Amino acid sequence: MARKPIVGGNWKCNIPTLKTATDLLDAWKANPHDASKVDMVICPSAIHIMPAKEQIESLGMFVATQNVSATGFGAFTGELAAEHLEDCGIGWTLIGHSERRKLYGETDADTAKKIEKCQEKGIKVIFCIGESLEEREAGKTDEVNKRQLSAVLSAIKDWDSIVIAYEPVWAIGTGKVATPDQAQDAHAAIRAFLKEAVSADVADKIRIQYGGSVKPENCAELIAKPDIDGFLVGGASTKDSFSTIYKTVQDAAFW
């Protein structure tokens, strides 16, 4: 089945000023993507989302938050509820990024609660999964991915609003990258698990991104693999050359 590619740009806390963000978006204007061939989702830091939202959307890209709360409105200091996203017209969010899991103690149960909130409000989710170096070396890649996915299956009613991002933790921001064959094997195993745990239709339609030190130099070989449907890009999405990545994905699209 042909799946429309999707490329995400997760700026994390790498963009220091609003002007830096708007200058970067201005630079991408010279290399527009074809929205009929590839979906683009940009995740600014929380403080830059609303000031940059109109400019991002003017490029035909979607805006996403990098995180969302497991709770709704109420006395939850520092949280960003799915209801806030709905009110502000923000249709996407990341959930379960490895940095949220590792640095801020986000659990599998937390990710399930967050997805449930987003499903209730019609917010689309890029759900991040992936193994550590120790888990990779112990041969537990598939085990970890299955565990993280199993935790959220019951929370998902609308699979069309879910994208999976496979991010081998050992490759995020390290300069290391899974080989195309390693990435393909992991993606194929995720798809096979979903076929068994959910349905063949969901497994066939679900878009699975690769994330982990994706750069202009390695993206073409990765996107050529049949089960890789795009990328979730971190640091490289804060550079002008990010356009090379999304144009490469666009040119490879069979959509």
Image (spheres, rainbow, N blue to C red):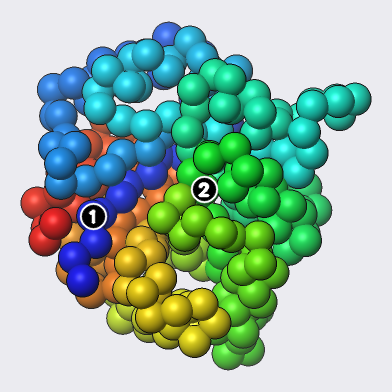
Q: Is residue 102 above or below residue 77?
A: below
The residue indicated by pointer 1 is 4
- Which residue appears farthest toward the bottom when viewing the image? 139
Image coordinates of residue 187 in percent, x first then y, are 39, 75
Q: Is residue 217 visible?
A: no
The residue indicated by pointer 2 is 125
| Residue 29, image quadrant | top left
Disc 1 packing (10 Å; few <14; some 14–19; many ≥20) = some
Amino acid type, mark 1 = Lys
Amino acid type, mark 2 = Val
Of residue 156 and residue 93, the one placed in the foreground of this image is: 156
Is there CB contact under 8 Å for labels 1 and 2?
no
Disc 2 packing (10 Å; few <14; some 14–19; many ≥20) = many
Image coordinates of residue 151 in percent, x first then y, are 69, 69
Q: Is residue 182 above or below residue 157?
A: below
Task: Name which residue lies at 41% across and 55% down.
Answer: 160
Q: Quadrant of the C terminus?
A: bottom left
- Side (left or right) of 147 relative to 45: right
Task: Name which residue lies at 58% across and 27% down.
Answer: 85
Image coordinates of residue 89 in percent, x first then y, are 49, 22
| Residue 56, image quadrant | top left
Determine the CA span between mark 1 and mark 2: 16 Å
Q: Is residue 173 above or below residue 28?
A: below
